Image (cartoon, grey):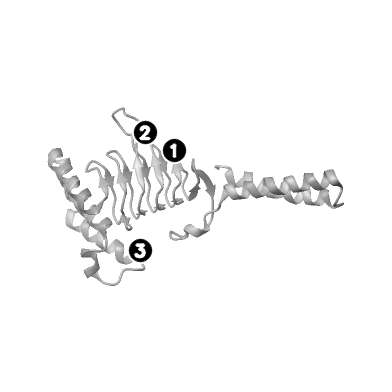
């Protein structure tokens, strides 16, 4: 595909994925993520031709104006949308597939000083929430979503949701790119389980309730559900 055709798809990604989009004139001043991708397309073409210093200079100027840091050596597919974009960092060996959505503050970073593949591979149709950090030579499977502020350091299978620090994988059937409010709070669920368990133990000691066994079974069911959610199948 020609460079200009890729750039046209980058512009159309805003219209298709941002409900706040009103008119094309807004692209000139309200979407730094789009311009960061466009500048990357140009710099990446130059980078592949061997003019690496010029490519790095172009992306340095881009970072100054957009506050988005993309290495020109990264591989970015079609129809990628960086929403808001402030603080996004994409490393040199990162690979991003098609139709990926990245929100502000995301880092696709490395954890090794050795040469070679150091950054993540993001497969098609992935959504990465605001502030998430995806680190190292790992793969995020297609149509997965990374919860806001999660820190992911291990491979994620396709069609998964990741939440927490470190990121925990939770399988799910539904998928909504903007459904950040529907991500499970697994730390909260564990805390509630522990509080329920303490309450049952207190009632057992004081003999204040005769339905302790029934309550104990209810709490155990919650705990089994919690453990099931953590399984990475």
**Position of residue 228 measured from the top left corner of the image (x, y, whole percent):** 62, 45
Q: Secondary structure at mark 1?
A: loop
Residue drawn at (34%, 38%), measured in percent from left and top?
Answer: 119
On the picture, is 78 further left or further right than 133?
Answer: left
Which mark is on residue 195?
Answer: none
Farthest front residue in view: 206
Mark whose residue sits in front, 3 or 1: 1
Q: Is residue 94 above or below residue 131?
A: above
Determine the CA span between mark 2 and mark 3.
Answer: 31 Å
* Contact between labelled residues 3 and 2, with CB atoms less than 8 Å apart: no
Residue drawn at (48%, 50%), measured in percent from left and top?
Answer: 159
Count the numbered circles shown. 3
Quadrant showing the C terminus: top right
Q: Is residue 111 above or below residue 103?
A: above
**Position of residue 92 measured from the top left corner of the image (x, y, whole percent):** 27, 39
For marks 2 and 3, the one nearer the N-term is 3
For marks 2 and 1, the one nearer the N-term is 2
Which mark is on residue 111?
Answer: 2
Q: Residues within 10 Å of mark 3 (few under 14, many from 20)?
A: some
Determine the CA span between mark 3 and mark 1.
Answer: 28 Å
Q: Secondary structure at mark 3?
A: helix
Residue drawn at (29%, 31%), measured in percent from left and top?
Answer: 116
* Contact between labelled residues 1 and 3, with CB atoms less than 8 Å apart: no
Classify residue 117 by image quadrant.
top left
Asked whether 170 or 180 is in front, the reply is 180
* Contact between labelled residues 1 and 2, with CB atoms less than 8 Å apart: yes
**Position of residue 74 measured from the top left corner of the image (x, y, whole percent):** 26, 42
Query: Which residue carries the number 1 mark?
Result: 153
Q: Secondary structure at mark 2?
A: loop
Residue drawn at (22%, 61%), measured in percent from left and top?
Answer: 8
Which mark is on residue 17?
Answer: 3
């Amino acid at each position: 595909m020609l460079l200009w055709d890729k750039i046209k798809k980058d512009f159309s990604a805003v219209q298709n994925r941002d409900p706040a989009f009103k008119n094309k004139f807004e692209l000139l001043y309200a979407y730094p993520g789009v311009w960061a991708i466009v500048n990357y397309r140009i710099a990446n073409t130059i980078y592949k031709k061997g003019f690496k210093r010029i490519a790095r200079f172009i992306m340095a100027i881009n970072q100054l104006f957009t506050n988005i840091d993309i290495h020109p050596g990264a591989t970015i597919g079609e129809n990628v949308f960086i929403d808001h974009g402030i603080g996004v960092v994409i490393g040199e060996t990162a690979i991003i597939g098609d139709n990926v959505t990245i929100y502000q503050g995301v880092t696709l970073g490395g954890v090794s000083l050795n040469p070679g593949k150091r950054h993540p591979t993001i497969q098609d149709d992935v959504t990465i929430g605001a502030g998430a950090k995806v680190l190292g030579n790992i793969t995020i499977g297609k149509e997965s979503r990374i919860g806001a502020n999660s820190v992911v350091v291990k491979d994620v299978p396709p069609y998964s949701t990741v939440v927490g620090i470190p990121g925990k994988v939770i399988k799910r059937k539904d998928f909504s790119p903007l459904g950040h409010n529907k991500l499970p709070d697994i730390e909260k669920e564990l805390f509630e389980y522990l509080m329920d368990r303490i309450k049952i133990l207190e009632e057992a000691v004081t003999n204040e309730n005769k339905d302790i066994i029934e309550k104990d079974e209810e709490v155990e069911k919650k705990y089994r559900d919690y453990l099931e959610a953590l399984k990475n199948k």
